[in-house]
Amino acid sequence: MTYKIPIGPYHPALEEPYKIELICEGEVIKDTKLKVGFNFRGIEFLAQKRSYYQDIALVERVCGICSNVHTLTFCQAIEKLAGITVSERAQYIRVILCELERLHSHSLWAGVAAELIGFQTVFMVCFKLRENVMDILEMISGNRVNYGMNCVGGVNRDISDTTTILNSVDTMEKELTGTIIPIFTSNRIVQSRCAGVGILTHEQAQNWGTVGPTARASGIDQDIRKSSAYAVYDSLTLILQCNKTEMCWLAL
Amino acid sequence: MEELLIHNQWTKEMGISQLWEKKVDGWWVFVPFLHTLEMAKIMRSAGSRLITITAIHENTGNTHLAYHWDLAGEIFTWVCSAEDNIFVSICEVCPGADWVEREIRDYYAVTFLGQSEHNPLMLRAHDPAGVFLPVEKEVI
């Protein structure tokens, strides 16, 4: 018997309002329908009505999780148009912010994924790690969500207290390599939920224009930081994590 | 130079005389009245991946579409226009283009022939498409 399970558009498990309709047969999900657009704000249209400087504050509010990358991209576009060169130190600070944002974003999604598969303890561990990252972001920028770090031609603040930040990074590395990564790679609960399911073949990943860790889990060995390196990424060593097993477990 | 010849081979396969131009952000070619589905097939068979489509509304009332493709880290952009802003959907070969095409339809009232999904992406079901188009003022 086929039946539908509606989730959303407003639901505790969803970070943003969207509606998923699951079409099920027994306990097997046969198809899904997704509806978005519940928070349409017309930001692109608003940006056309403001100056470039006003737009920086606007684009920072596109997303509350990846606010920094939007202002960085926007500022880099203006700098390219105007032929502005950014100092090396400012570019390194931009990279530090980008990596911290990646770290808190990935730990958030790892935590949410853990919660969705019913692994509450890992959810707590991931969010504890994320808190550490956000503390560092607050230490650097004075803010936890919209950092206001990027400006045309550089950054708004310098990083002065590097010792405290490096100590926090060491603690986080231990937490990540000692607890979180082993759980996601070898724990039976995670494997029983994620291994062998959610297959996205290399061909499908190409057809759907997949990017990031999802693409790399399907064997697309590409990372924007390497293939189209921005800021000072071309002078950093980046080890690409790519896998050809095409499972959602590897993406996780 | 050899690279440039390979890219021009794509346009040649479609009987197009325009040449690719190297810019700071990749390769660009402008082809008015481009058969977008054919272009998508050629790009996919070359192993490239659709990044996104951007729309540029002109004062003339035409909307130009820019199809951005990634091939091993290099970006190739086809820019095109269409009569009465009616383009051919590329969802048949790139299902990932579905959301992009629907979003462009919502904002610029562009038609994509062959699009199987007729519901708006960002707007409500009965909202009129073209919310980003300049408001036409009545001149007495």
Image (spheres, coloured by chain):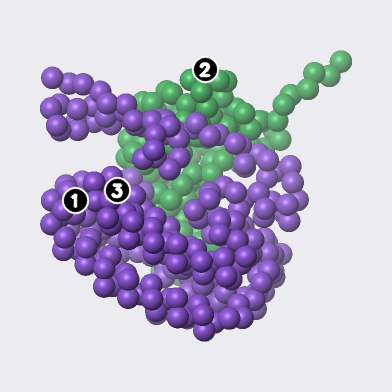
Chain colours: A purple, B green
Asked which secondary structure carries label 2, the reply is: loop
Q: Earlier in the sequence, mark 1 or mark 3?
A: 3
Secondary structure under tag 3 reads helix
* Left or right relative to A90: residue A1: left
Q: How many angstroms separate mark 1 from mark 3 (CA)? A: 13 Å
**Chain for mark 1?**
A
x%, y% of residue A144? 56, 59
Instruction: Give above or below for A207 relative to B62.
Output: below
Indicate the quadrant where residue A40 lies.
Answer: top right
Q: Residue at 21% across / 21% down in the picture?
A: A3
Q: Please tell me whether mark 2 or mark 1 is closer to you in this view.
A: 1
Residue B140 occupies quadrant: top right
Residue depth check, mark 1 versus mark 3: number of the one nearer the observer: 3
Q: Chain of mark 3?
A: A
> Mark 3 or mark 2: which is in front?
3
Quadrant of the rendered structure where residue A168 is? bottom left
Q: Position of residue A30 (x, y in %)?
A: 19, 31
Location of residue A113 with respect to A157 vertically, above or below = above
**In this view, which residue lies farthest toward the bottom?**
A163
Mark 3: few/some/many CA within 10 Å (<14, 14-19, 20+): some
Which residue is disc 2 drawn over?
A: B126
Neighbourhood count class around disc 2 (C-alpha, 10 Å): few under 14, some 14–19, many 20 upward: few
Three-letter amino acid code of the residue under disc 1:
Cys
The quarter of the picture where the N terminus of chain B appears is bottom left
Residue, disc 3: A115
